Image (cartoon, rainbow, N blue to C red):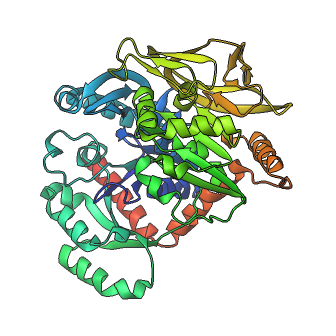
Amino acid sequence: MAKALPIMFQGTNSDVGKSVIVTAFCRIFAQDGHQTVPFKSQNMSLNSYITFDGKEIGRAQGVQAEAAGIHATTHMNPILIKPNRDNESQIVVHGKPYKNMEAGIYRKEFFQTGIELIKESLSVLSEIYERIVIEGAGSPAEINLNDRELVNMRVARMANAPVILIGDIEKGGVFASLVGTLQLMEPEDRDRVIGVIINKFRGDVRLLESGLTWFEEYTGKPVLGVIPYIQHLNIDAEDSVSLNQYTAAQNTEKELDIVVIQYPKISNFTDVDPFFAEPDCHVRFITSAEQLQEPDLVILPGSKNTIEDLIFLSESGIAQKIVELHLKKKSVLFGICGGYQMLGKDIQDPLAIESLHQIMEGLCLLPIQTTITKEKTTVLSDGVLDLYGKSFRVTGYEIHMGETETTGECHGLIETKGRTDGCKTADEKVIGTYFHGIFHNDEFRKELLNQIRHSKGLAPINNRISYTQLREEAFDRLADHVRGHVKLDFIERKMKEYQKRRITQ
């Protein structure tokens, strides 16, 4: 490591808030004038982010880069694991598919390759940036995996980074999980932990003080912060483990009912995030036909295994209900990426890239046909979208391993760089596109929602939010929130001590 000061955040388990806290520290350090970069050596997620040069990384690292005010690169997440069927995942190396591997094979054969990739990326980032904020995964106390792990204490040792351990008090048993995690660490790794953060606290912190005192006396590790739960953050979630938080506290009395189909291999579900910030939108994620009802807008999001998720739609009865809604002209149906493919005639996978099923009939609502191919499209896209007699300049990103062709008269949706993306029916009730992030385009989203309002006899809303501005405000709000509840001076001092230790070694 050349000049960068690293700090690493690990957790007692998944979903303790590591990604969010790393995002906060990226913003905090950037606000304080430091060139800052996020890093996660190995990420397992179906929620992807496309870098400026058209490469694929975990969405969390892309968002963290935005918080730091920099462009994302694959060195921030050199290894991405995307589960695509039982016990098998697509391994993405520096933003491009490497191969599909079973878990045991990956652990046995990829380990040394992974080590070299991580070393290289850390070296590159340390030459460019002043601060590296590193995120672990799962828990460092997975004793059955630690001999060949590539994302927790081995990375901390490579970077010579001090570690802060995060516990989630919302789940209960936070002191037991923190103490147990520390006790299961090797002594040298335990010494590297400079303190702990208790995250997602609700209530009166004074009631926690006796526990904090006991913890510090028992472990010898300081509590560096108790961070209250922060709601309505408007910052992308990393993966589907966060989906249960999406609809927990929504106002069901809102005027527009939006349904998102939550199939088993749902990906890039953050495409629908802007709707949560709209004043008139109630968003529901559904997994059964009974939940569908008669919404105003049905969104079929992306999928990492489109054929298997299409089978889920058929077996659950959701597919039939969607077709019935279309026949009644009750809802606007909008498919994105895999959801777009599902709206077509069929999906074929002759090389068994994603599924053992070579062909599966689609919903037959758009005149398109898709073939899964070996080559993966990953690109930032822009173009002009035509809908409701108006044109909108839109941007987005594409991640797909399928080629889609029209099989009949197709009304194109977006004109982009000499080609047409997407398809819509003549009545514009069924719409599909490969553009992830399509709803993040404010003017298009406003028109879509106001057209739905018009169809219901409701007045338009013309002063809708700017989602880009909302995200920037959310980064600042998160940074201020975390800054106000952690011992930042102590953390800074420890980072500098580790740098001096590295120089003298």
| Horizontal relation, residue 163 to residue 298: left or right | left
Question: What residue appears at the point 39 percent right and 30 percent down from the top-left corner?
Answer: 308
Question: What residue appears at the point 73 percent right and 24 percent down from the top-left corner?
Answer: 414
Could you tell me residue 423's position as x and y percent? 68, 23
Placement of 437 over or under 32, stated as above or below: above
**93 or 306, nearer to the observer:** 306
Asked which quadrant contains residue 53, the reply is top right
- The N terminus: image quadrant: top left
Could you tell me residue 244's position as x and y percent? 45, 57
| Horizontal relation, residue 68 to residue 212: left or right | right
Count the labels in the image: 0
Could you tell me residue 310's position as x and y percent? 45, 31
**378 or 248, nearer to the observer:** 248
Placement of 464 over or under 389, stated as above or below: below
Residue 310, can we see it? yes
**259 or 190, nearer to the observer:** 259
Placement of 237 over or under 128, stated as above or below: below
Question: What residue appears at the point 37 percent right and 56 percent down from the top-left corner?
Answer: 15
Residue 1, can we see it? no
| Horizontal relation, residue 114 to residue 9: left or right | left
**458 or 176, nearer to the observer:** 458
